[in-house]
C-alpha cells in the first residue's frame, strides 16, 4: 500500500513544509505533473544523448537518476517562481498556484508532443520500477515482499515524514520555520529572515512535489502519461489538512486515502463480479469521494498555521 501512497505522501509533505512557513501551495498538482514529465525526459535524454555504448538510440538504456535530477531541477524552478510571486511580490498565493496548475496542464502536453510526438504517453524509459533499493533484503523469506516494492521513492516516503517531524519540532531551524508561519513579525523582530525562510520552504515544497510526480512516472511506471497525476496533488492537500499540517499526521492521512485506491484495485482484480452490480466509474472515483467526505466533516475543525496564506511585509505593525 505504501507504494501507491508514495506520491500522496511526498506531495503532502511538500504542502506541510510550505504552509508551516505561511505560504499556501495549491500548485502541488501542477508541480507533480511537471516533475513526472521532466523525470521521464531526463531519463530519456541520458540515453539518447549521453549513453556512450548504444549511441543514444535506446531510451531504456538511460539513467533514471538523471530523471530524478531533472525532477528536482524543475521543482526548484517552479518553487522559486511561486516564492517570488507569493513572498517578494506579495501576490495572491491561490492565484499563483492555480496559474502554475493551468500551465502544467497545457505545457506538459505541448512538451510531450514536442519531444515524443504524441499527446498520449511517452515511450518507456529507464526507471526504478521493479528495482528494489535493497535487493538482498528483498530475497529474504516472509519479509522479502516488503522490501521488493521499496524503491528509492518508497524509501523516501517512509523516512521523510519522521525526518521532517524532527526538523520542525526538535531543531532551532525548525522552530524558526514554524515561527515564520505562526507570527512572522515576531520572528522578524528576533532577527529571523522571514523572506529567506519562506523562500527555502517553498523551494523544498517544490522539490518534494516534483519527486512525488517522478515517483509515478519513473517509480511506479516507466513512462509519463498525459493524465498524470490525475488529481493526486489535490488529495495530497487534503491529506495535509486531515493530518493537521504535521508531517506524521500527513503520512497516516495519505495512507488512509490510499486505502481507497487499494480497495479499488482489489475489486477490479479479485472481485470483478461486483462491477456487474456497482458501476466501474464509482470505484475509479472512490479516492476522490472519500477525500470530499473527509474534508466536509473535518476541514472546519482543522486549524492551519496562524499566518498561513498571509503575505508579510517588513515593517508591518504587530
Image: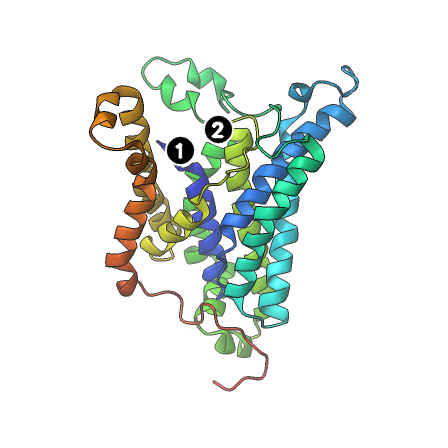
Q: Which mark is residue 287?
A: none
Q: Residue 296's image quarter? A: bottom left
Report the residue at 46% width, 54% height from top. 15
C-alpha span from label 1 to label 2: 8 Å
Report the residue at 52% width, 54% height from top. 27
Q: Is residue 301 above or below residue 57?
A: below
Report the residue at 63% width, 50% height from top. 76
Q: Which residue is mark 1?
A: 4
Q: Is residue 56 above or below residue 88?
A: above
Q: Which residue is mark 2?
A: 220
Instruction: Please give left or right for residue 132 compared with residue 4 in the image.
Output: right
Instruction: Please give left or right for residue 190 compared with residue 283 in the image.
Output: right
> Which one is in front, 282 or 299?
282
- For label 2, the crowd category at 10 Å Cα-Cα, with few meaning under 14, some 14 to 19 and many 20 or more, is many
x then y, percent, for residue 304: 37, 65
Q: How many marks?
A: 2
Report the residue at 66% width, 45% height from top. 73
* Viewport quadrant of the N terminus: top left
Q: Is residue 3 above or below residue 205?
A: above
Amino acid at each position: 500500500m505504501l507504494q501507491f501512497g508514495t506520491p500522496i505522501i511526498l506531495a503532502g509533505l511538500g504542502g506541510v513544509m510550505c504552509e508551516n512557513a505561511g505560504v499556501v501551495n495549491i500548485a502541488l498538482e501542477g508541480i507533480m505533473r511537471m516533475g513526472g514529465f521532466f523525470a521521464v525526459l531526463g531519463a530519456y535524454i541520458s540515453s539518447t544523448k549521453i549513453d556512450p555504448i548504444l549511441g543514444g538510440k535506446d531510451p531504456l538504456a538511460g539513467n533514471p537518476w538523471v530523471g530524478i535530477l531533472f525532477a528536482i531541477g524543475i521543482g526548484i524552478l517552479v518553487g522559486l517562481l511561486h516564492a517570488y510571486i507569493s513572498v517578494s511580490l506579495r501576490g495572491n498565493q491561490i492565484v499563483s498556484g492555480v496559474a502554475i496548475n493551468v500551465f502544467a496542464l497545457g505545457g506538459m502536453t505541448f512538451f510531450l508532443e514536442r519531444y515524443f510526438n504524441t499527446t498520449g504517453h511517452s515511450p518507456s524509459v529507464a526507471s526504478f520500477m521493479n528495482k528494489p533499493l535493497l535487493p538482498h533484503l528483498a530475497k529474504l523469506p516472509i519479509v522479502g515482499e516488503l522490501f521488493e516494492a521499496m524503491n528509492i521513492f518508497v524509501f523516501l516516503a517512509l523516512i521523510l515524514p519522521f525526518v521532517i517531524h524532527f526538523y520542525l519540532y526538535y531543531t532551532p531551524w525548525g522552530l524558526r520555520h514554524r515561527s515564520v508561519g505562526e507570527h512572522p513579525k515576531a520572528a522578524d523582530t528576533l532577527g529571523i529572515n522571514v523572506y529567506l525562510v519562506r523562500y527555502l520552504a517553498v523551494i523544498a515544497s517544490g522539490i518534494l512535489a516534483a519527486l512525488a510526480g517522478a515517483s509515478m512516472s519513473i517509480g511506479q511506471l516507466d513512462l509519463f502519461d498525459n493524465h498524470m497525476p490525475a488529481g493526486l496533488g489535490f488529495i495530497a492537500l487534503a491529506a495535509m489538512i486531515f493530518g493537521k499540517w504535521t508531517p506524521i499526521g500527513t503520512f497516516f492521512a495519505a495512507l488512509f486515502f490510499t486505502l481507497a485506491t487499494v480497495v479499488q484495485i482489489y475489486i477490479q482484480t479479485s472481485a470483478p463480479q461486483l462491477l456487474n452490480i456497482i458501476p466501474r466509474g464509482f470505484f475509479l472515483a472512490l479516492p476522490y469521494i472519500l477525500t470530499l467526505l473527509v474534508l466536509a466533516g473535518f476541514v472546519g475543525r482543522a486549524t492551519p498555521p496562524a499566518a498561513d496564506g498571509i503575505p508579510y511585509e517588513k515593517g508591518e505593525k504587530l
